[in-house]
Structure formats: structure tokens, C-alpha cells
């Protein structure tokens, strides 16, 4: 089992304040990430449990960090069936950049079969790009 990281960087054509509101509330992911059909949140803030459903299964997540001052949102995916990966932690960090939002969205995970890394990377990059488009639409 090897540890891997996928790092992505995006410009969201929307104000950082509004993008942060949509990310940091932890709920409503289905409004901006096309893959997600429903999303429910149990609890508030760090430690809250989030359950997102997709046509390919369920994502059970724990909210690890909501840092309003530095605009960092971090979540663990405790259980999922989308990709053959484990120990998954996603981190979204945003900052204002010329009236737009700079979003770094990274994924740390463990992988048993190194040969499928390119497939995982392509899937994650596509999913994140769709999420950026969705955040742009609901944040303007």
C-alpha cells in the first residue's frame, strides 16, 4: 500500500467569499458537484458526518477541518465505492485573487495497485473540474 497525492489548482470565476460559503457549509454538495445526487449532514462543524450518494455508490465522510480564517476545508472519506483507494483525505483551500477565487483541491490516499494511479488521477481531475464549474455557477 503506497501513499499518493493528487494536487489540483483552479480559478473559480466567482468571489472567494461566496465560494467559501458554499464549501464551508459542508452540506449541499449536490448543488455544485454533478457526481453527487444527494447529500446529508449529521452534526455541525468539525466531526460532522456527511453522506453523499452517487449513481456508483455512497460516500461516507467526516468533516475534519473548517478553518474560516484561512479558508481551508478538509474531509476524510471513510467509506466509498467510486475508486479502489483507502485512507482518503480531501483538502480544499481558497484565496481571493483579482476578484476571483483560487482553489487548491488536493486528495491524499493509499493505493494498493500502483498501475491504476493514472486512471484514479484522471477520474479525480475530471470530478474536481466539474465541481469547480458547479461552484462557479452557484457562487455568482
Image: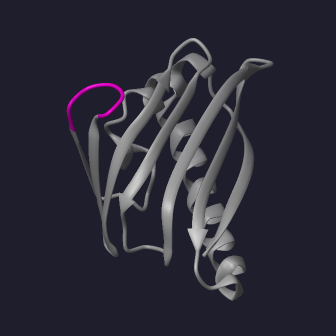
Secondary structure mostly taken by the magenta-highlighted segment of the chain: loop
**Residue 123 in sight from this viewpoint:** yes
Figure colour scheme: one colour
Horizontal side of 121 relative to 79 (left or right) equals right
Q: Nearer the viewer, residue 65 or 118?
A: 65
Would you say residue 82 sits in the magenta stretch?
no
- Residue found at x 38% / y 38%: 63
Q: Is residue 47 above or below residue 70?
A: below
Residue 113 image position (x, y, % from top left): 62, 85
Q: Is residue 50 left or right of residue 135?
A: left
Image position, residue 127 (x, y; %): 56, 61
In the image, taking residue 62 as reference, residue 134 lies left or right, namely right
Q: Is residue 43 magenta?
A: yes
Q: Assign the C terminus to one quadrant of the image.
A: top right
Residue at 63 percent of width and 27 percent of height: 14
Q: Give percent across and percent down for residue 76.
A: 44, 49
| In this view, 39 is above or below 48 | below
Residue at the extreme top: 69
Residue at coordinates 65% horizontally, 49% vertically from top-left?
A: 106
User: In the rendered structure, which segment of residues is drawn in magenta?
Assistant: 42-47
In-front residue for pair 47/90:
47
Q: Is residue 140 visible?
A: no
Is 135 in front, or is 115? 115
Amino acid at each position: 500500500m503506497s501513499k499518493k497525492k493528487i494536487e489540483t489548482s483552479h480559478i473559480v470565476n466567482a468571489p472567494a467569499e461566496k465560494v467559501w460559503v458554499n464549501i464551508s457549509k459542508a452540506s449541499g454538495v449536490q448543488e455544485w458537484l454533478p457526481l453527487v445526487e444527494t447529500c446529508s449532514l449529521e452534526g455541525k462543524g468539525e466531526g460532522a458526518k456527511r453522506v453523499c450518494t452517487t449513481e456508483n455508490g455512497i460516500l461516507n465522510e467526516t468533516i475534519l477541518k473548517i478553518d474560516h480564517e484561512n479558508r481551508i476545508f478538509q474531509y476524510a472519506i471513510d467509506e466509498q465505492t467510486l475508486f479502489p483507494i483507502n485512507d482518503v483525505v480531501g483538502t480544499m483551500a481558497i484565496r481571493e485573487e483579482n476578484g476571483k477565487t483560487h482553489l487548491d483541491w488536493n486528495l491524499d490516499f493509499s493505493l494498493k495497485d500502483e498501475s491504476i494511479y493514472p486512471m484514479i488521477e484522471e477520474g479525480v481531475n475530471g470530478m474536481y473540474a466539474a465541481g469547480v464549474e458547479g461552484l462557479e455557477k452557484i457562487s455568482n
